[in-house]
Image (cartoon, grey):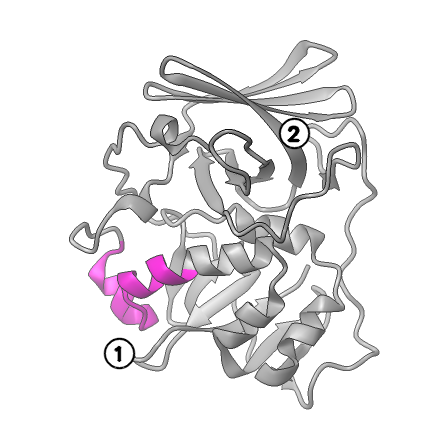
Amino acid sequence: MKNHYLTRSLAVLVGMLSVLLGSCEPEETISSAANSSETEAVTTPEQSATIRPAEAETTTSESQPTTNVQSSNFEISHYSNEDWAIAVVNTGNFETPNLTYYACDQGKANCIELTGGTEECGGDVCIYDWTNGNVRYSLEVSEYAKLLQVYENDKLILESTDLQQDYAQFYDDDVDLVPQDREEVAGISEAQLKALLPKIQKAVFTENWQTLADISADSVNVKFSEDAEMTAVPKAALAKTLAEQDLKTWKMRVMTQTFEDLFLNQYGAMIGQGSIWIGSKAMEDPAQIITINIW
């Protein structure tokens, strides 16, 4: 993506952290041993060619080219308002972008992933389009406004305004984005969070499960479905375990997590409505992935 269009104005976006804990807190009861072959992976709804953000569906556009997960380039931009959390990933370059679109509602219940986006820039405005059957998703980004519009057969069916770009990645450590009391409760510093979140999202996007394993605790608590008990998976087995799961919905929830909306409590920091929890034993200790909830 052309960051010189997306980052022209670094307005101060120090918002209050949203309390999204819900029912996603790490559970204390853990079943013994590593991942069992009897554990079932979470499934997602059937794909639909006419998906709208307002509908309770999750889909990946089958008509678009497969994302180049081997690309060494990785740029991610986040936009959100009270309704939607959006991530745009570019694995191409300045001349030839390769754009992937992720969007979830703020409850992370309804998500969508689309690849093969197009880019048209002029002046201070860039417009990014993705198609899914007869539905077109259009994200307009300028210095003055960020706007999502969804068209079905060229008829506007949804418009979401007041999108704010998450500029956390551009702030240095002198800008305090996380209240100190929350850092102390979670035992994770802001610097650790700013380093870990993009690293986790790049690994999830590229499905580089070994990278996730490398930044995980010696044993990770994994919940393979909403109704399942936690399973203790050794760090050495985590990459293989994740590679065997259906992670479509889980992936979209992780990718749309903004830094501004990270939730911190005594368990650590929650990514993707509890899809991943990171934590550390003490503020000076490195933060690690401690829990993964797949649903």
Task: Give the residue pinned by disc 2.
Answer: 54
- Upstream in the sequence, badge 2 or badge 1? 2
Residue 16 got which mark? none
Q: Amino acid at mark 2?
A: Ala
Q: Position of residue 101 (x, y in %)?
A: 59, 36
Quarter-wise, where is residue 30 in the image? bottom right
Which residue is tagged 1? 284
SS type, badge 1 = loop
Q: Position of residue 190 (x, y in %)?
A: 28, 61
Residue at (58, 68) in percent of width and height? 292
Helix, strand or loop status at disc 2 = loop
* Numbered-mark total: 2
Give x and y (percent) for residue 53: 64, 31
Query: Which residue in the rendered view is the most extreme toward the left?
Result: 174
Relative image position of residue 76 (x, y in whole percent): 47, 43
The residue at 46%/43% (across/down) is 75
Quadrant where the C terminus lies? bottom right
- Badge 1 amino acid: Glu
View extreme (front): residue: 95
Foreground: 263 or 3?
3
Q: Let me know if residue 69 appears in the view.
A: yes
Q: Is residue 85 above or below residue 41?
A: above
Look at the image and give the residue range highlighted in magenta.
Answer: 178-196
Q: Going 72% across and 72% down the picture, which residue do you hit?
A: 228
For label 1, the crowd category at 10 Å Cα-Cα, with few meaning under 14, some 14 to 19 and many 20 or more, is few
